[in-house]
Image (cartoon, grey):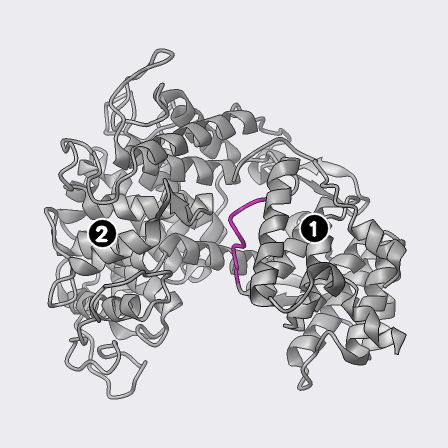
Amino acid sequence: MSDQTLVHMSTRKVLRVGLAVPLGAALVVAISFGSVPAGAQQAVPPKKSAVPGKGGAAGGGAAGGQAAPPPAASGIIASDDDPRVKAAVARAAAWLRTRANQRHQPGELALAVHSLAKIHEKYPDLVAENDPALLHMVESLKAYCPPSGFIPAQKGGHDNYEAGVVAMALSAAGGEANRKEIEVVAQYIMSKQSPNGSWNYDGETAGDTSMTQYAILGLWEAASGAGVPVPHEVWDRAAVWLLNTQLSNGGFEYHPPANPPQNHVGDATHTMTVASLGSLYICRDHLPFGKRKNNKGVLLAVEDESAKEKGTSYKPQSTPEAFKQALDRAAAWVDANFTLDKARGAGDGGGGQWYFYYLYAFERFATLAGVTHVAGHHWYDEGARLILAKQQEDGSWTHSHGPEVNTGFAVLFLIRSTYISQKIHQKRIGRGTQISGRGIPKNLDELQQEGGGLKAKGIVGKTGDLLVAIETGNVDISERAARGLLDQMYDSKNKWSAAGEQGAQLKRALEKSIKSKNSEGIKAILKALALTNDFRVVPLLIDGMYYEDDPEVQLEARRALCLISRKFNGFGKIYPEEATKEEWQDEIDRWVAWYKAVRPESAYEDDVDLLTSVEKK
């Protein structure tokens, strides 16, 4: 690659396109009691299977629904891949499967379904896709969601919790396959939103922070996990309520007043502050603060699909600046008041009454924030060790609110449920039709259905011909040629690498695309480079994050880095159009540090030009 090209991609100037955006009691009552609606199918006990992974008790050679106890939780637990975590989750999965023949109301059932479905995503050898206990529980849960409307077991406000956890469970257990039922639940949740944007007990006007959290979670999974449309107004109204009820010290309380005064002191608690942080991140990510480019390179605001149908465009009342300030202030409160086992919550000054509820909410906040340490503490390590130490002999966790509830929350923390949700959402978006038809050819004969969405058919041809087609700059042709190249790379029996003629071809296509400012070509080659699984291309991908002409190229470069590194969320959610120069540079610096850690023998700056070695021979 020429020095001129390297300078173009390595100007070390970051494109700043957008505004700066940084990266309770009622719930337990709601999910612990209630009756089964008429006609709802009851789960039946699963049959034991002698075939590993085909139903029966999972868990590393366990028999009769029992799993071997995990090793002692001593020493640091660096991640959810720790074998001690898997052993504990295996025991929990075996216990959860035994609940299939119990009589449950929707909340308890949903927690079991959610936990088992997420365990399947994390450890498919522990819970198979066709696990009979999980399938029966899913069918029982769907019985609460007929086309006529969601059937809550409780009323008066507790139904908000039920609907939220049911939407979460059905999304985790199939997403688009359960879309009809999820749509029913989502409509119910949206119908219960108060005029001020919160969710609350019937007849109350102020708002309930915990209840609002679970309504937002249900809509998040419905929208991102199953593709159910949720208007921007719903997210914005919830966000405005949260922003208006934040306390002067940065924390949040359980039941704020209806019209809190400025600098309201209130009673900040750990449980409600981490709950609100997670809710704010979710609402922010569903509002149209970012911009995308159309095929002509013109920046367009992302509009609400329902608003476009009405011929109007919804303008959010919340702003990126308000989100940034609220998130920073709340995070500072959590940092200053850090605890994992002595959290303050409703009716509890720190005795641990809301232990597992809090830890699951903490996992969500920390994952959405993209942080591994809070107040200098490795939150996952400390939280996981606390949880493992409390597991019962039968694989469950029991506390002041019963084993079903606590086991669900404990499992969801251990397997990093929020992180798994993010990966599921990314896969669903990747399978679906591209936003606003971008990249879809005008000739509908050139479309193919895949994973429930429409994609351009890839052109079949030789590698060199496909690369030439990518370089043309024609959006439709580039898209189809890129798809053909990527299909070829996925199906190729020969392993692609950075060295050799294939690497040289990719390099030449990248150089030509850069010179012609063909964004579609650059993005396709960056993705192709990542598919080589050759870490020597990482410096090129990192340099793509500096590309000034198109933030979508920067974003594709980051996605390519996530793909090749298997760090599917990178170092947290960050987008070039929303990041400050300093925030985007910090993300780049983290990738450079990661590369130097995995290839300590290499020199980063020298490796940028590595692909040119073929031409210099």
Decide: marks 2, 1 in contact (CB < 8 A)? no
Q: Is residue 497 left or right of residue 124?
A: right
Q: Is residue 77 left or right of residue 391?
A: right
Mark 2 or mark 1: whose residue is earlier in sequence = 2
Q: Residue furthest bottom?
A: 50
Viewer can see residue 214: yes
Specify the segment rendered in magenta: 567-575
Q: Is residue 563 left or right of residue 1?
A: left
Q: Is residue 87 above or below residue 183?
A: below
Q: Is residue 370 above or below residue 2?
A: above
Residue 276: x %, y % from top left: 36, 34
| Mark 2, residue position | 106
Q: Amino acid at mark 2?
A: Pro
Q: Quadrant of the C terminus?
A: bottom right
Which residue: 78% across, 77% down?
Answer: 502
Main SS, magenta residues: loop
Tell me the quarter of the picture where residue 157 sits: top left
Q: Which is nearer the eye, 386 or 263?
A: 386
Task: Rate crowding at label 2 as few (under 14), some (14 to 19) or many (20 or more) other CA atoms within 10 Å.
Answer: many
Q: Which is nearer the eye, 392 or 612?
A: 612
- Please, what secondary structure does the residue beneath circle 1 have? loop
Residue 5: x %, y % from top left: 86, 56
Residue 153: x %, y % from top left: 19, 46
Task: Rate crowding at label 1 as few (under 14), some (14 to 19) or many (20 or more) other CA atoms within 10 Å.
Answer: many
Residue 21: x %, y % from top left: 56, 34
Which residue: 85% across, 67% down?
Answer: 508
Q: Amino acid at mark 1?
A: Met
| Mark 1, residue position | 545
Question: Which of the two marks, 2 or 1, is nearer to us in this view?
Answer: 1
